Amino acid sequence: MESSSQHTVPRRTPTLEMVAEVAGVSRATVSRVINDSPKVTPEVIAVVNAAIAELNYVPNRAARSLASRKTQAIALIVPESTAKVFADPFFASVVQGVATHLSSTDYTLNLLIASETDPDKTRRYLLGGNVDGALVVSHHSGDHSYTQLGNALPIVFGGRPLQADATDSYYVDADNVHGARIATEYLIGRGRRQIAAIAGPQDMPAGIDRLRGFREALASAGLTEGPVETADFSPAGGADAMRRLLATGQPLDAVLAANDQMAAGAYGALAEAGLRVPHDVALIGFDNDNFGATLSPPLTTVDQSPVALGEEMARKLVQLIAGDPVPRATITPTRLVERTSV
Amino acid sequence: MESSSQHTVPRRTPTLEMVAEVAGVSRATVSRVINDSPKVTPEVIAVVNAAIAELNYVPNRAARSLASRKTQAIALIVPESTAKVFADPFFASVVQGVATHLSSTDYTLNLLIASETDPDKTRRYLLGGNVDGALVVSHHSGDHSYTQLGNALPIVFGGRPLQADATDSYYVDADNVHGARIATEYLIGRGRRQIAAIAGPQDMPAGIDRLRGFREALASAGLTEGPVETADFSPAGGADAMRRLLATGQPLDAVLAANDQMAAGAYGALAEAGLRVPHDVALIGFDNDNFGATLSPPLTTVDQSPVALGEEMARKLVQLIAGDPVPRATITPTRLVERTSV
DNA sequence: ATGAAAGCGCTAACAT
DNA sequence: ATGTTAGCGCTTTCAT
């Protein structure tokens, strides 16, 4: 391209050295100003900043990383299988929370789809000094297979670990037990007494914890629990589970679904059976997915604020990198969203 | 499984120099092997690779960038306002597409939420040599305010530009005109003759193009178009528009909504009016959002495959960076998803 | 085909 | 408080 050499300056991006020259100070001083070193005179700071502004100088990240051995970058790892359900608002929101928090810091966010066929690629990326820390989110699954890397660099997980042997990892999780508990209590408060549940997979923390909250609420109220069927968090699975619930023949005036997708499936199964929501059966979901409001009747559900979860994860990681003391676990609140399915 | 060594060495991450030593060659040669230089003997390549494997060597990105003046990173910019609707599956899918394609390359993805209060931050980031190129996505809006930066570094936009003066930017867009056209033709094919539309904002390319497709189909069929109301792509807006459509008093047996969210709103308004879908009024949406299948009846809609759009954007940018000739515009296909609302 | 050596732009001791 | 001086780990002419 470039037919060069006519005239004109190569117009290279300005370097720290050029700033030093314009400001009439040494490069070290410029560096100090850039990094907010406490020991620089206000006057000098002003002069340097003026030079920076004049030249429109922006520090070169690569050079900085190389010299300081810090990247100012963090990785957000999304396992491939969950990426397929990236359309899942949960994920998108977590990512949003992470990105939002990070934009208030000097960290850069590197989004990584972890290939499951070549897990080493991710591993090498993380160990290759590309980032100062990592965030791992895997929907509902509690997969902490990156735990071992926690010794090599700071890692914060989204969702509590499933295995007990992974308890030394840092994580942020929504208060699933509490959410299921208040949802169930709400049902009870509205006079429902024969409460069934469509539980999530019992090998995932979210599935386990939500069922637990359900049971705790019932126990506290002295109620015997209705039938429980587990499904896979999908609409189709929820519909099936609902049919099985009905097929048990046990009376039932309310159902707690472990997520909104399954609740959506339950609507269909209930309609098939000629049952009306909430008149015959009250229904309550979990996650506060966007579409819940478009169902009819609009779905009452539990909000777990994934954006907050993402922000919390990012905040925690930044602290960890800074070497600040940080608790292993952080639990974000869940709250009931009242609509009209109950 | 390497337990901590009895003797020596702080176990630093291996450098290229160490690889050179182990392989018994110069650093330059190792570098050549790493970068697939054509002029290295197969034997030497083998020896070097063995050393790399033995040491578990991973090149340092910062050093590489600094020396080569390439970052191997690309930025994905999401304007803040749209980030608020990040839960919008459209976005999440585009991001997924981008990330997926990039994971098959050596590029790293830097996700950036562009603060609208401080647009300079993003600008400086892009100009600061942090990335080799950028992707800009702004839902439905056609905002190409970063166009000017296109001269400083390669940029690919999601969605066609709204202003004619931005025609020199590179972009990928879904074939909205075609999508609306086939949806309308489908309605016609099913015997509908009084077809109305809930159009999107007429200051957004997606809104404009979809209405255009609708009109083209009607004109081709020699049908006069039913009433058209525009709304803001939201469910509430869609519901309102539907009410206005009904209030016109004009007969109408089908409605094309410019997106699924508005279609969802229309369901409610139709139900209020005692009209049944699809018996009285056929309804068709656009976007193929996840929740469409959970509506009852399930919504027939147009799929625009945002994942493909994201992949296409990434592919295009990578080519642009490589200096390959690339067409300004790339249009991704749209297709009808038949369900039962028609 | 391979090696030697000079940086890339910055930070971090160490001086002063 | 500011300047000097080495590198950080890699790529890239230029020799050979």
Image: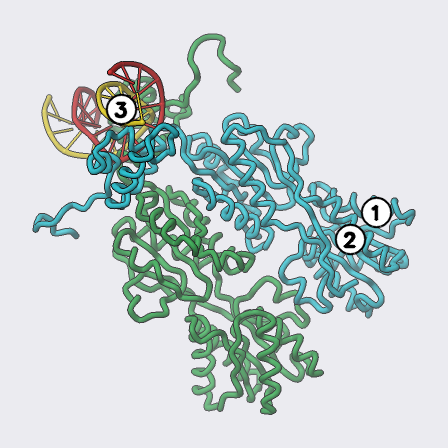
Chain colours: A cyan, B green, C red, D yellow
Q: Quadrant of residue A89?
A: bottom right
Q: Which residue is mark 1?
A: A217
Query: Can residue A76 be seen here?
Result: yes
Dot 1 or dot 2, earlier in sequence: 2
A69 or A297, which is in the foreground? Answer: A69
- Name the amino acid, label 1: Ala
Q: Quick check: B308 left or right of B237?
A: left
**Which quadrant would the C terminus of chain A be assigned to in this image?**
bottom right
A246 or B248, which is in the foreground? Answer: B248
Indicate which label's residue lies in the foreground, 3 or 1: 1
- Look at the numbered disc 3 and give the secondary structure of its residue: helix
A230 or B13, which is in the foreground? Answer: B13
Tell whether label 2 touches label 1 (CB within 8 Å): yes
Which label belongs to residue B25?
none
Q: Which residue is mark 3?
A: B27
Q: Could you tell me how far apart the alpha carbons at marks 2 and 3 are, in whole angstroms? A: 64 Å
- Look at the numbered disc 2 and give the secondary structure of its residue: helix
Q: Which residue is mark 2?
A: A183
**Residue appearing at x 69%, y 30% in the figure:** A164
Task: Name the subunit of mark 3.
Answer: B
